[in-house]
Image (cartoon, rainbow, N blue to C red):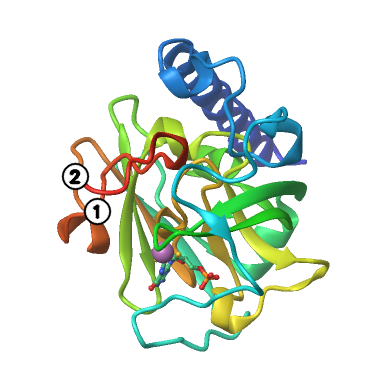
Amino acid sequence: MTDDTAAKEERIVAARMRLRDRFEARMADTPAMADEAPMGTGPANRHGMPQVPPGQHLAKGWPVLDLGRKPEVATGEWRLELAGAVARPVALTWDDLQALPQVDDVSDFHCVTTWSKLDVPWRGVRFADLAALAEPDDDADFVLCHGYDGYTTNVRLEEALKPDVLIAHTVYGEPLAREHGGPARMITPQLYAWKGAKWISKIEFLTENRLGFWEQRGYSDTAHPWRNDRYS
Ligand SMILES: Nc1nc2c(c(=O)[nH]1)N[C@H]1C(S)=C(S)[C@@H](COP(=O)(O)O)O[C@H]1N2
Ligand SMILES: [Mo]
């Protein structure tokens, strides 16, 4: 390893640790994690609670929701930009994504239009591991996620740092289908599913909140399914 590479790795590890400290400090005073059972992150976290959040029912199959466009992005062309309030903007290639630590996680998926899917087995890269690569500024409190279809959605950084938030490329052991956001999408199991951008192209770190597509149209900024938090 060259000195350069070693220094870079050290910086990324330091950024990862700063993000973790921040996440833990914030979680200590947010209701979602102060609850004994945070609920929403899959079987281990439902603790005998009702199967689906208030007003939700189990979906048959897996509905597809989009803006009427399903962009086709070949993995060779795919880039994921990390930009905005960060020390080191980067554009990851598909190989870069695959070279990061890969995580398997089973989580629940709640669409605000009232259907839910339970126990979805995803594989991908933790948002927190990705974010560290760009070294977000300490006052970057929000992210705006962009899709190749022009979609946007905003997420508080602390929500995005939850360990079940992934940039997922595989589901049920198969490459993520284009209709569900393949080659890669974000998932936010503890928030309504519109907060997870399909065909994710860019994660913009922001010091001030900026509303995404549905948030501008009256959907909740915070979007917690277990609090029936659908509209603003
Ligand atoms: N890029 C993009 N991401 C998106 C959307 C979209 O229209 N475009 N729809 C959102 C909504 S409303 C939901 S419920 C989920 C649906 O994911 P699915 O089609 O895989 O069920 O994706 C979210 N992410
Ligand atoms: Mo949705």
Q: In which quarter of the view is residue 96 placed? A: bottom right
Q: In which quarter of the view is residue 81 placed? A: bottom left
Q: Is residue 151 left or right of residue 53?
A: left
Q: Residue at x 63, y 49 (%)?
A: 108
Q: Is residue 75 left or right of residue 198?
A: right
Residue 76 shows in the view: no
Residue 64: horizontal and vertical position, in percent? 51, 78
Residue 154: horizontal and vertical position, in percent? 31, 50
Mark 2 Cα shell of 10 Å, populated few (<14), some (14-19), many (≥20) = few
Q: Quadrant of the N terminus?
A: top right
Q: Residue at x 61, y 22 (%)?
A: 37
Q: Is residue 94 left or right of residue 34?
A: right
- Judging by the rendered image, the residue that carries numbered circle 2 is 232
Q: Residue at x 72, y 30 (%)?
A: 48
The response on whether ligand 2 sits within 8 Å of label 2 is no
The foreground one among 85 and 181 is 181
Q: Which circle's residue, 1 or 2, is located before the other in the chain?
A: 1
Amino acid bearing label 2: Ser
Which circle marks residue 82 in the picture? Answer: none
Element on which disc 1 rests = loop
Q: Is residue 145 left or right of residue 206?
A: right
Amino acid bearing label 1: Tyr
Element on which disc 2 rests = loop
The image shows residue 187, relative to residue 86, as above or below, that is below
- Judging by the rendered image, the residue that carries numbered circle 1 is 219
Q: Quadrant of ligand 1?
A: bottom left
CA gap, disc 1 and disc 2? 6 Å
The foreground one among 110 and 59 is 59
Residue 231 shows in the view: yes
